[in-house]
Amino acid sequence: MRSLRASLFILAFPTIAAAQETAQFSGRTWQLMGQDVKFETHLDQEAVRFRNGAIVLADFEFENGTVEFDAATTGHRSFVGLAFRVAADGSGYEDFYLRPHQTGRFDAMQYTPVFYDISAWQLYPEYNSSIDIPTDRWVHVKLVISGSKLEAYFDGAEEPTLVVDELKRGAGAGLLALKSNFPAAAQLPDVWPTAFANFVVAPDDTPGEFQEAADPAPGLISRWALSPAFPAPEGMIREIPPEMMEAEGWRAVDSESSGLVNLARHGGFPEGARQATVIARAIVHSDREQVKKLAFGFSDRGSIFLNGQIVFSGDNTYRSRSLRYLGVVTIDNDAVYLPLRQGENELVIAVSEAFGGWGLIARLEDLDGVSVEPRSP
């Protein structure tokens, strides 16, 4: 696990070949990843128990179908679930998990895509579900995965508890892994908070349907020129280092239909970096001198520059604004008024990430007299 950003909320998968050994569970062969995994009888079931780690279903690729398993938790703060369509090199996967310590809250069940070991739960708050997660008994989880859609059924429910209409990593088969992350493992060495039993997978050879992306709403900035990633400077960025603007490797990227740009989709952190920064750049053409409101959200830290001058700098990290603040990204996180001159205006946003989601979304209040295009420096 690379850093706090991964270890708090997901289990980052190194290359699958690094798995230490194999074991039989539910009639299948699994590769073990992590030291804190054991097989034993738990609550009268043959089970695999975790503190931290994962087991990867060996020699089996999955794209569409149904996955079912039983899970039992102690209620300790942990993240318990299934990674699916896992890339063999560990660069990404779709992540479904339960949060037993959040039982009854809106985010007790979550889905997030993972790109380059960077989770994105702060970017997709719509993919949460409120459930009660009982402790010290088995609950049944059924996941129906087809194309871009995920339906999760919890504890025998006839209707799905969570529906994801747009799985973010797109088409492609990958590996399956049961996993658990227990942040307090060092402080509670005798606690094994997670168990799985009765794993069943039924692949469906019928190609799944993928939702066609809608066009972004008017005013959303849907295309940006994006720099390569750099190790994040300490603290807030008050000016753009020239080496970031002059670097090779800039490219034009499209947002999702919501206007959100999941920056991790376009590359991971530089090797060895625990935090990273990218620069998003666009040219705003204005037919006259005027002022436009720009609404925006970002994660985790962001600074906005217009024509070389800083006009905003802010912090949207987890717990940055209150003890319970999650750092979720929405279009209404912040706003600034841009004094546009006639002709071309350079809009630059520096976005730094620590953990939980690396993203950007921005919308001009209207497009009267303006147009926007991505352009590299």
Image: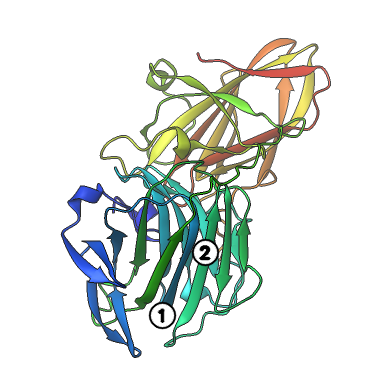
Q: Residue at x 80, y 12 (%)?
A: 288
Q: Say if residue 236 shows up in the picture.
A: no
**Kind of residue at badge 1:** Thr
For marks 1 and 2, give the one nearer the viewer.
Answer: 2
Image quadrant where residue 83 sits: bottom left
Q: Are marks 1 and 2 in contact (CB under 8 Å)?
A: no
Q: Which residue is mark 1?
A: 73
Q: Which residue is mark 2?
A: 143
Element on which disc 1 rests: strand
Q: Residue at x 35, y 44 (%)?
A: 87
Q: Nearer the viewer, residue 48 or 354?
A: 48
Placement of the N terminus among the 4 image quadrants: bottom left
Q: Residue 209: image x %, image y %?
A: 60, 44
Q: Which mark is residue 201?
A: none
- In the rendered structure, the answer to whether residue 286 lies left or right of residue 13 reads right
Element on which disc 2 rests: strand
Q: Residue 352: image x %, image y %?
A: 46, 39
**Kind of residue at badge 2:** Leu
Q: Residues within 10 Å of mark 2 (few under 14, many from 20)?
A: many
Q: Nearer the viewer, residue 364 or 39?
A: 39
Can you say whether 114 is above or below 350 in the image? below
Q: Residues within 10 Å of mark 1 (few under 14, many from 20)?
A: many
- In the rendered structure, the answer to whether residue 336 lies left or right of residue 324 reads right
